[in-house]
Amino acid sequence: MHPFYELTAPATGDSVSFSVARWPSSTAHWVGRDAEGRPAILLEVDASGFGDAPPVALRNLRIDHAVEVKVQHADVGTVAGRMTVVRCLSNSEQLTKYFLDIADRLVSRLGDVPTPADILSAVRHLQALFLPMRQPAAITVQGLWAELLVIAESRSPKRMLRCWRVTDTDRYDFNDGQLRLEVKSCSTSLRAHIFSQRQMELVPSAQTMVASLLIEETAAGTSLEALYERVLAFGQLCGQDERVQVAVARLLGESRAAAMSSCYDQELAMASLRFYKQEDLPRLPGPIPDAIDSIQFRILMDRVPHVLSKEMVALGGLFESSVPSA
């Protein structure tokens, strides 16, 4: 159990008092519980190195640099000192867990003697994770689950991560220069996917494939959180973990806390995986009039020839990497 859950709120009810325990991965920093029972990170710092660095105030996160606080520890009693305080502003069980998971990685990466520059960099990363919680989701939970599954089950998760979308406005889910891969999923037995006109445009000198999966929600399935943790572990091996964290935060937006418990049938999804060439998909004849802003297609994929896994392997690069591992 995380030491935060063993702490009780401080006896004094002011905003600068915390009951604390040493962070599991550190001998210098503290995990705290404030007067309202919410979690916090308390980083021992050299106050002179922060100048007039402003506080950060978001819906679920507040960060104050080099502030005077009182910490209550079971062994040493109450001690005052200047610290950078990062606190979660929610009592939600899901957000508390999310905050503590991020904090564990942050404190471990900072080490026991971080510089002010190290801490300010970590703060920017935290902002990037919590700021999207004020925005609507840019993807469905099912859609993100499908993308993470393709990464986790691929022959080369590291390569897939390097090619994974940078923003939610990217045209393709995976882009490796001349090779692109779009992941589509549907929750019915009829394999039918929606494509935008932009996704249907053939790019000269580039080749695009579509990975199609049938997805079924089930309480006994694999959760989005479990897939996220698997992909995050691959990300740590290739220095992409912070990018994975930020990408998922941006894509899920305000739905993140609730979305992570969503579960889908992984075996069914993997058994249903098919690959299709973009040029084999049906499209409207002739150019689209300039006055038409956007068009979407619903394509019945079972009426389109699919590409065998061995053909994907033969194509190499991103396409070979996306094929499930044996």
Image (cartoon, rainbow, N blue to C red):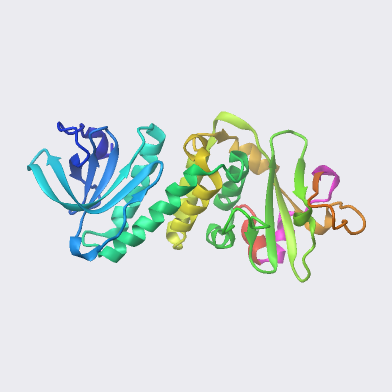
114 w.r.t. 32: above or below: below
- Using the image as rendered, state which of residue 253 and residue 180 is in the foreground: 253
> Percent from the top left, x then y, of residue 216?
64, 33
Furthest toward the left, the residue is 76
* Vertical relation: 269 (above or below) 116: above
Q: Position of residue 179 (x, y in %)?
A: 69, 65
- Nearest the viewer among 309 and 121 is 121
Vertical comparison of 59 with 112: above or below: above
Q: Residue furthest right?
A: 286
Residue 275 coordinates in the image, percent (x, y): 73, 52
Which residue is located at x 92 percent, y 58 percent?
286
Asked which quadrant contains residue 171, the reply is bottom right
Q: Image quadrant of residue 291?
A: bottom right
Count the labels in the image.
0
Query: Is 294 in the magenta?
Result: no
Q: Which residue is more in the foreground, 155 or 168?
A: 168
Instruction: Left or right? Give the position of 260 relative to 270.
Output: left
Q: Residue furthest bottom?
A: 205
Residue 123, position as x, y percentages in the image = 35, 56
Foreground: 43 or 310? 43
Residue located at (76% from left, 48% from top): 195
Res. 297 visible in picture: yes
**Residue at image location 24% in from the left, 38% down from the top:** 33
In the picture provided, is 243 more to the left or to the right than 38?
right
For the magenta stretch, what is the residue range?
Answer: 299-316
